Image: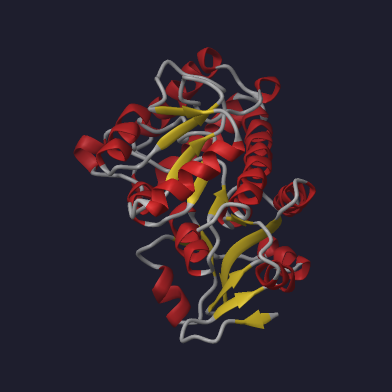
């Protein structure tokens, strides 16, 4: 391990430290998918698989987490295994990340927290599954993910399969537009719907390859514009659950949540679990496929970025 010489306990894995020394492409990965996304040992298997996808595509993976007060940029295999089996791991976003570090805690990073850590480490690309967004009923609850505001202020390109389909996606896109976040769909005009490749929503922007996405990232920085860009990468068609099939399932899960009085932070895990059950596990299979697809694209974007002047 190599520790950064700063007041912040920033710790690089040996693999990431070597990549930094050699100016090799690096792709950040979040850790909540490991601690909160699926059970052990499947979570560990998927984490290893996604990291290997990035290596196979020519970049270095940097899974990010806070472990005993140190912000880790990249985990070795033992750390990955320990995190996959850890209990009561905090779920960190912008609001609580610093407190976890200062108090010596252990926490997994959400999209917002991973963006912050990646930027601190000089990593420009981050691959995830889907971003958080505006929750249904937000006009009453004001429940809007910190991910959206992070995209507006932290200069990291985030690759996701759109926003999670359980959210109010039109309002999510509206908030991103208001915040000046470029939303760029890869290879199609419709905005992807997480488990589904397409939707009836028009994507604000479209680019068709990693080179163009890397150039857009650099151009934004050259203009002095704050924030990053959201790259919406559709799940491969062979792995998707069509939106028409999924819509009534999501509606049923939402109706059950309302009937049972599920609210606040309990809504998302309830809905995801019910959708998993109602699709007989297909939602999780699709989730894994889209994360891997995003990781591969992230590696290509990162490889293009290292060849572009800053």
Residue toward you, 168 or 14:
14
Vertical relation: 251 (above or below) 153? above
Residue at 71% in and 69% down: 79
Q: Is residue 224 left or right of residue 289?
A: left
Farthest front residue? 309
Residue toward you, 150 or 195:
150
Give the image quarter of residue 205. Answer: top left
Q: Is residue 200 left or right of residue 235?
A: left
Residue at 43% in and 47% down: 219
Q: How many marks?
A: 0
The spot of residue 123 in percent (x, y) is 55, 61
The spot of residue 308 in percent (x, y) is 57, 52
The spot of residue 47 in percent (x, y) is 71, 52
Colour scheme employed for the rendering of this structure: secondary structure
Q: Is residue 256 visible?
A: yes
Residue toward you, 180 or 66:
180
Vertical relation: 113 (above or below) 292? below
Q: Is residue 136 visible?
A: no
Quarter containing the N terminus: bottom right
Q: Is residue 39 left or right of residue 41?
A: left
Q: Is residue 225 left or right of residue 214?
A: left
The spot of residue 238 in percent (x, y) is 70, 20
Farthest top residue? 244
Residue toward you, 132 or 62:
62
Residue at 65% in and 69% down: 20
């Amino acid at each position: 391990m190599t520790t950064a010489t700063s007041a912040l306990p920033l710790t690089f894995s040996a693999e990431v430290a070597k990549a930094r020394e050699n100016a090799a492409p690096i792709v950040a990965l979040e850790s909540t998918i490991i601690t909160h996304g699926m059970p052990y040992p499947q979570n560990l298997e998927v984490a290893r698989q996604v990291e290997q996808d990035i290596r196979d595509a020519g970049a270095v993976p940097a899974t990010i987490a806070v472990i005993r007060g140190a912000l880790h940029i990249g985990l070795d295999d033992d750390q990955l295994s320990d995190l996959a089996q850890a209990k009561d791991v905090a779920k960190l976003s912008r609001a609580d990340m610093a407190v976890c570090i200062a108090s010596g805690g252990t926490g997994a990073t959400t999209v917002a927290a991973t963006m912050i850590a990646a930027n601190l480490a000089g990593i420009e690309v981050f691959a995830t599954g889907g971003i958080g967004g505006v929750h249904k009923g937000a006009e009453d609850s004001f429940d809007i993910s910190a991910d959206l505001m992070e995209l507006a202020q932290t200069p990291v390109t985030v690759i996701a399969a759109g926003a999670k389909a359980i959210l109010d996606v039109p309002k999510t896109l509206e908030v991103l537009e208001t915040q000046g976040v470029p939303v760029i769909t890869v290879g199609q005009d419709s905005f992807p719907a997480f488990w589904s490749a397409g939707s009836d929503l028009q994507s604000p922007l479209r680019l068709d390859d990693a080179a163009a996405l890397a150039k857009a990232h650099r151009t934004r920085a050259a203009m002095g514009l704050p924030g990053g860009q959201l790259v919406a990468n559709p799940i491969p068609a062979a792995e998707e659950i069509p939106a028409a099939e999924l819509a009534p399932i999501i509606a049923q899960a939402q109706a059950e949540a309302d009937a049972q009085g599920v609210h606040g932070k309990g809504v998302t895990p309830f809905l995801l679990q019910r959708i998993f059950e109602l699709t007989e596990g297909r939602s999780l299979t699709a989730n894994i496929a889209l994360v891997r697809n995003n990781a591969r694209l992230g590696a290509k974007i990162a490889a293009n970025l290292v060849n572009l002047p800053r």
